[in-house]
Amino acid sequence: MSAALLPLFVAVPLMTAALLVIAGDRRTVHAVGLLGTMIAAVGAAVALVFEFRSGGAMAHGVSSWPFGIAIPFVADMFTALMLVVTGLLTIVCSWFAIASGRAANVYFAPLVLVLTAGVNGALLTADLFNLFVFIEVMLLPSYGLFVLAARHKGTLQQVAGARLYVTLNLLTSTVFLIGVGFIYGTAGTVNLAELAGLATTEPTVAISGAVCLFALGIKASVVPVHGWLAAAYPATSPAITALFSGLHTKVAIYGIYRVYAVLFDGDSRWLWIGVTLFCLTMVIGVLGAVGEKTTRSILAFHMISQIGYILLGVALFTLAGLTAGIFYLLHHMIVKASLFLSTGAVEVRYGTGEIGKLSGIAKREPVIAVAFFIAALSLAGLPPFSGFVAKFTLILASVEAGQIAAVVVMLLVSLVTLLSMLKIWSGVFWGNSTSSLFDCDDAPAVSSAPSPLGGVATKQAPAASSTVVAERPRIGMGLAGPAVVTAAITLGLGLGAELLLGLSAVAAEGLLDTTTYVQAVMGS
């Protein structure tokens, strides 16, 4: 694959988004345009993975401007793996949104495509200022998707969640831009290739880089700046929650890995700070889930906890640690999306995700129950799923690095994670079937209509005082399919972990020794 094609990862989604806006309210055209573009993007990303299977990097200066003026787009194995998984998750989450009726709005597909362009640009750029720009490109359509999550008039929780999400991200982007300005003021450049290793010798550059890492830490929801995620993510629709879980915080995590590897050259003097913060993130995140009463709130807190595991890899900054961290990142993106999609399917069909209002769903919905069960065991780290491989390799890397306290924390947090997954399982899927799903007057009934993917488009119906289970349509494969597919992937990654571990090791080597990455950018 030619390096000159890298900008197409941004250009094609943007152009398709514009064409879909022009096309107007044609749902089939929007579904085909969105999914077709994303499938093509995933295919191109897979080609990049094949290109970098033995290492290496490629870079291109947009429009062939001279180095230092052109926007540098660069890809290596780490970038390629992220492009594959983010693209795959966008496909399954869009599939779920179409099947659940959330994609009916004429602006849904264009907004998702603009979001994709921002994500791809953030993963590909080797310029800190343009990283800021692409993060903003990623965030602006996200605000619109948050608004579209409300069917007609948003609830108080939705309004508060959207307000928090927008305010927090605007503040964080400002902090990140200040850090980029400080770097430019002290180093005279924001190009990562020219900044390589500079933070190890220039204290002012190190402080400026720390401001950028702090901003990325907020976006990644690292303790103590984690509370916004647990409040904001459950406030939108299940489809958007699943989509954001696989993209937003993960782009920030990717940025932390990349910036610390290149700018700080993995400086060992500051790694203890990361180990401490990330262990606290594991503990506080998992404890926050204990008192929650809805499936998405529990999963949101566990998302915070798992981010601590992922970032521990960069805090170890050894080949084994980085390999385990990258594997954990890719595994978690898939598993967490699967959990949000399986519980989201229940929420869309039955109108609630509150623990205690539903029970015995597994007897009526065995397919979605199995999908949740697989993903839940994977999140907890049980074999033969990918979560076991991720945690086992991270534990081995921590032992090798002498971080025994971190190992103890990981094991204890894994136990509490399993208990939380069992809480959802016993409160929603297990037990006797509920004779009446809703005993309160404000419980919504759900009507259905065909969707472009053969699922159902749900609509809010007038309140009903009692809705009998037998009168409700079951969750069709259009709605259950995304959760089933992602659950199958985590099982496949667990059984065939050697392939992804090998690719993750190649990506880790590129972070340990950034020479190839830097030379590719300098020659672009």
Image (cartoon, helix red, strand yellow):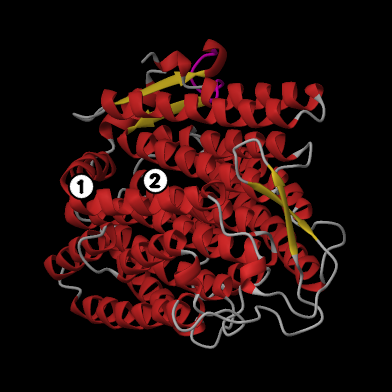
Secondary structure beneath dot 2 equals: helix
Are discs 2 and 1 less than 8 Å apart at CB?
no
Q: Whole-percent x and y of residue 490?
A: 32, 53
Q: Is residue 141 above or below residue 299?
A: above
Amino acid at pointer 2: Arg
Magenta stretch: includes residue 311: no
- Outermost bottom residue: 291
Counting from the top left corner in percent of width and height, residue 201 is at 35, 50
> Is residue 185 visible to the viewer in this orientation of the structure?
no
Segment tinted magenta in the rendering: 65-71
Between 5 and 98, the one lying in front of the other is 98
Q: Mark 1 points at which residue?
A: 501
The kind of residue on which mark 1 rests is: Leu
In the picture, the quarter occupied by the N terminus is top left
Task: Report the side of 272 relative to 73 (left or right).
Answer: left
Decide which of 61, 32 is in the foreground and name it: 32
